[in-house]
Amino acid sequence: EVQVLESGGGLVRPGGSLRLSCAASGFTFGTYTMSWVRQAPGKGLEWVAVISGSGGSTYYADSVKGRFTISTDNSKNTLYLQMNILRAEDTAIYYCAKLIGAGSSGWVDYWGQGTLVTVSS
Amino acid sequence: DIVMTQSPDSLAVSLGERATINCKSSQSVLHSSNKKKYLAWYQQKPGQPPKLLIYWASTRESGVPDRFSGSGSGTDFTLTISSLQAEDVAVYYCQQYYSTPLSFGGGTKVEIK
């Protein structure tokens, strides 16, 4: 059974840092594109970052470029999101998402339950 | 970047009636090489992560009831719920995967009239 489980969310002050983790199981982790998608309170879905299965390709939403870094550790079947210089507008539920279907792109066939990040003083 | 625009923002439908949600992409998501439409639909209920309903614009995910169907051309797409059930109350999102950055529509909230 495929599972993706996020951790690492919490309350952080503006300008601070946080690292999210996503532990994956039930599939060959290193062969699938993975992503972080966030949802601000009461708002819609926003792609944050995507990483190809090989780790060779990454891309970021303009809103987080230069502040967030997506990475994987295939030996631990884990996806990470390092978030620096956090702003109030980064407050959201962050979902770990497994992509399928279109090379280094695709649709999400499995979502985690999400981890809440709150940026506030 | 491809912008996805959904309409309406919300709709209220009687139980057993049809619900229709529209999604328009700012450029075609129909790939000329394989004739596939790079469009997916998701359902999100309160307090839950989204759930995949449809991919390739019209292919239903395993386990999704057949009252859900997707259709469309290169830029205009529709999600139809043929006979609305109480458990279909949710927000529905379209997503293009034709090009990066991937993008979602703004969502359509479906309620019972």
Image (cartoon, rainbow, N blue to C red):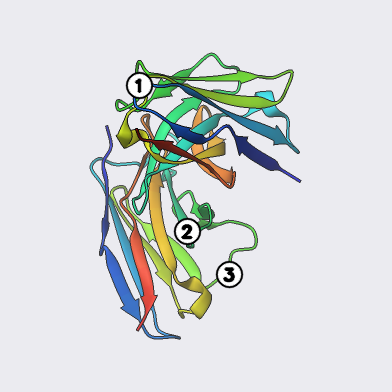
Label 3 marks a residue whose chain is: B
- Crowd class of label 3 (few under 14; some 14 to 19; many from 20; radius 10 Å): few
Q: Residue furthest left?
A: B26
Mark 3 and mark 2: span between their CA atoms? 15 Å
Q: Is residue B46 above or below residue A67?
A: below
Q: Nearer the viewer, residue B88 or B57?
A: B88
- Crowd class of label 2 (few under 14; some 14 to 19; many from 20; radius 10 Å): some
Front: mark 1 or 3:
1
- Quadrant for residue A16, please give it: top left
Residue at the spot of label 2: B44
Front: mark 3 or 2:
2
Percent of width and height locating residue A40: 37, 45
The residue located at (55%, 38%) in the rendering is A97
Label 2 marks a residue whose chain is: B
Dot label at residue A4? none
Label 1 marks a residue whose chain is: A
Mark 1 and mark 3: span between their CA atoms? 46 Å
The residue located at (66%, 26%) in the rendering is A78
Q: Are marks 1 and 3 on the same chain?
A: no
- Crowd class of label 1 (few under 14; some 14 to 19; many from 20; radius 10 Å): some
Dot label at residue A15? 1
Q: Nearer the viewer, residue B27 or A45?
A: A45
Dot label at residue B65? 3
Residue type at tag 1: Gly
Which quarter of the figure is the C terminus of chain B placed in?
bottom left
Which element is circle 2 on? strand
Q: Are marks 3 and 2 in contact (CB under 8 Å)?
A: no
Residue type at tag 3: Pro
Is residue A53 shown left or right of residue B8?
A: right
Residue type at tag 2: Gln
Q: Is residue B82 above or below residue B76?
A: below
